[in-house]
Amino acid sequence: MTVLDKFSLEGKVALVTGGYRGLGRAFAQALAEAGADVVVAARDEARSVEAAAEIAASTGRKTLGLRLDVTSRPEVEAAVARVTGELGRLDVLVNNAGTCVHRPALEVTDEEYDDVITTNLKGVWLPSVVAAAWMAEHGGGNIVNIGSISAQIVNRPQLQPVYNASKAAVHQLTKSLAAEWAPLGIRVNAIAPGYVKTEMAPVDRPEFRRMWIEDAPMQRYSTPEEVAATVVYLASEASSFSTGAVVVTDGGYTLF
């Protein structure tokens, strides 16, 4: 096996939560391009089905689009059962679904707090434990959690204390599950992206550009495709000796 062969996901099935837009869409596309059959899962079933069809058309891989509320155990269990039933297996889970509230702590409502923590933390916990139960009985697998540099820093100028706390919890959960599930053949890693240009991240607005872009050593934002390459690495045998890692991809932002 050559080094490039180790990056291949041929014969694997990958499930990406929140996979129909932004980072998730790029992750799903990249996994398919690396050879995996891909499941796009999100609350918006129609857009998930549409994204899955686009990926199938461009890569020739089998795909599946389905509705999934990552905070609902019955929906998560139904999704894993459908994926393994229709595609035969589940090798890779990418926990990408998330949400954020940009507001000072004294203005955050209890409802907003609950929504961010539930989506960003329980929404990683539930898919992970349900998928891991299947993986443990079928030879193992890989889980890739999408964390953030917000787990390590306090973002500026925007205020998002609940999001920051949720992503710090995701990083620690990644390490805890990695330690617990290594004997089961399940690797668990995370990515901590910096500022990425998506429809939800106004990286070009002047009030954000100075602190988000000009303060970083590389002085630019990332594209979703750049982050997606790291997802492929962590999902593949190229990272076979890595578990519990948090891979920072931020253009050097957190160096200062």
Image: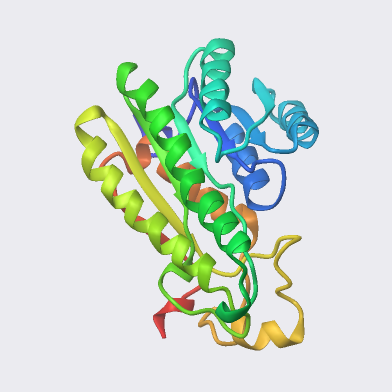
Q: Is residue 121 above or below residue 141?
A: below
Point out the image quarter for the N terminus: top left
Q: Position of residue 73 (x, y in %)?
A: 51, 31
What residue sits 39% from the left and 33% below the top?
129
* Viewer-nearest residue: 197 or 82: 82
How many numbered discs, if any? 0
Determine the image quadrant of residue 201: bottom right
Residue situated furthest left in the rendering: 183
Q: Position of residue 128 (x, y in %)?
A: 42, 36
What residue sits 31% from the left and 17% below the top?
137
Point out the image quarter for the C terminus: bottom left
What residue sits 37% from the left and 48% below the top?
189
Q: Position of residue 216 (x, y in %)?
A: 53, 82
Determine the image quadrant of residue 76: top right
Q: Is residue 49 among the parts visible in the rendering?
A: yes
What residue sits 45% from the left and 37% below the top?
126
Residue situated furthest front in the rendering: 110
How are the colours assigned in the image?
A: rainbow
Apparent side of residue 224 relative to residue 182 in the rendered image (left or right): right
Apparent side of residue 165 relative to residue 27 in the rendered image (left or right): left
* Viewer-nearest residue: 245 or 167: 167
Q: Is residue 173 above or below residue 66?
A: below
Q: Position of residue 211 (x, y in %)?
A: 60, 86
Q: Is residue 7 among the parts visible in the rendering?
A: no
